[in-house]
Structures are given as structure tokens and as C-alpha cells.
């Protein structure tokens, strides 16, 4: 769903469950920090807004977006968390590097989520230029960090609901 059709940053409290009992990891790329820091701020503020305690938001940095899947895997393997939000920004350049990184990261995040049976959220921007990135990191299209946090909360809730109903 494109941001022109819906801006998930505009959720209301009625749309999102309480996240008071959730523990959320955030793996964040050190590359394009102007953008990733804004996405992180949005994700953290949204987690706090819906009840995640500050102590239950665990942030770890990785060198670049390519390293996000491994960072998420380490967090799920070694920490007691319910989900990981992966935050990064890869801006289109003149070479195919963009395509290789974006494809590898998307597949890696999907693989980690399947391996651990826990949500791993794709909070990676893939814009054509810095203006598009800024528009999605607190600009006219909202903050995709907010959306990633809302997605994490909703997926944790779905996962726990299904697990609890299956064990009843």
C-alpha cells in the first residue's frame, strides 16, 4: 500500500492494542543517520505512546542496512524480546548496489522472522533521493518509524492471540 493511499502514521489509539507487556528490539543502521535517527525517534515515541516501557525498548546499531538481518537475528537469539524493528535507509545511486542491498535486506529480514517465529519489521526506506527520504522520516508522508512500530505492536498482538487460542 503506497503512502499516497494511506499514512499509517495517522493511527488512533482505538486502532492499536495496548503494548504494556511487549518488549521490542530495534536494529538501526548507522548509514544515513539524518534519516535513520528520525525513524528511530518515531518508532520509540510510538512504542511509548502505546504503552511499551522505555526499559522494554532495546536499541542496537549495525554498520549499514545490509547488516540489519544479522543484527535482528542476534537480538532474537540472545534477548528476551517479542519483535525487532529494522530501521535503515538505502538511497538509489548510479549503480546496481542499491538493488542488491535492498533485495538482500528484504529477504534476510523475512528469513529471520520465519526462523524465529517472531515479527521482524521492515522499517527500511528505499527512496530515489534524500528529499523522498526526508518526506518519509517525519515529513509530508509521516514517519515510517511510527508505522514500523505500529506494525510491530499489531504483529506481536496477532502472534500472541493465535498462540494463546491454540493452547486453550
Image (cartoon, rainbow, N blue to C red):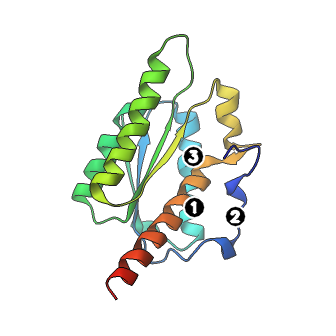
Residue to which mark 2 is pinned:
11
First in residue order: circle 3 vs circle 1:
3
Distance from label 3 to label 1 (Cα)? 13 Å
First in residue order: circle 1 vs circle 2:
2
Question: Where 136 sits versus 158, above or below?
Answer: above
Quadrant in the rendering for residue 133: top right
Distance from label 3 to label 2 (Cα)? 16 Å
**Secondary structure type for disc 2:** loop
First in residue order: circle 3 vs circle 2:
2
Residue 87 lies, in percent from the top left, at 48, 44
Residue 104 vs residue 115: left or right? Answer: right
**Secondary structure type for disc 1:** helix
Residue 168 lies, in percent from the top left, at 34, 89
Name the residue at the top extreme. 94
User: Who's the residue at 48% across and 72% down the image?
Assistant: 157
Residue to which mark 1 is pinned:
150
Quadrant in the rendering for residue 136: top right
Amino acid at each position: 500500500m503506497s503512502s499516497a493511499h494511506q499514512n499509517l502514521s495517522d493511527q488512533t489509539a482505538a486502532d492499536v492494542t495496548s503494548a504494556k507487556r511487549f518488549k521490542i528490539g530495534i536494529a538501526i543502521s548507522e548509514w544515513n543517520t539524518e534519516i535513520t535517527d528520525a525513524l528511530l525517534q518515531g518508532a520509540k515515541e510510538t512504542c511509548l505512546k502505546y504503552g511499551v516501557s522505555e526499559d522494554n525498548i532495546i536499541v542496537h546499531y549495525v554498520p549499514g542496512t545490509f547488516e540489519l538481518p544479522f543484527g535482528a537475528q542476534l537480538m532474537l537469539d540472545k534477548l528476551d524480546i517479542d519483535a525487532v524493528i529494522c530501521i535503515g535507509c538505502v538511497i538509489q545511486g548510479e549503480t546496481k548496489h542499491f538493488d542488491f542491498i535492498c533485495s538482500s535486506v528484504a529477504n534476510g529480514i523475512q528469513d529471520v522472522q520465519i526462523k524465529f517465529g517472531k515479527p521482524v519489521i521492515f522499517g527500511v526506506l528505499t527512496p530515489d533521493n534524500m528529499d523522498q527520504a526526508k518526506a518519509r522520516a517525519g515529513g509530508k508522508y509521516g514517519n515510517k518509524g511510527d508505522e514500523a512500530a505500529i506494525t510491530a505492536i499489531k504483529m506481536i498482538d496477532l502472534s500472541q492471540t493465535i498462540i494463546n487460542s491454540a493452547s486453550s
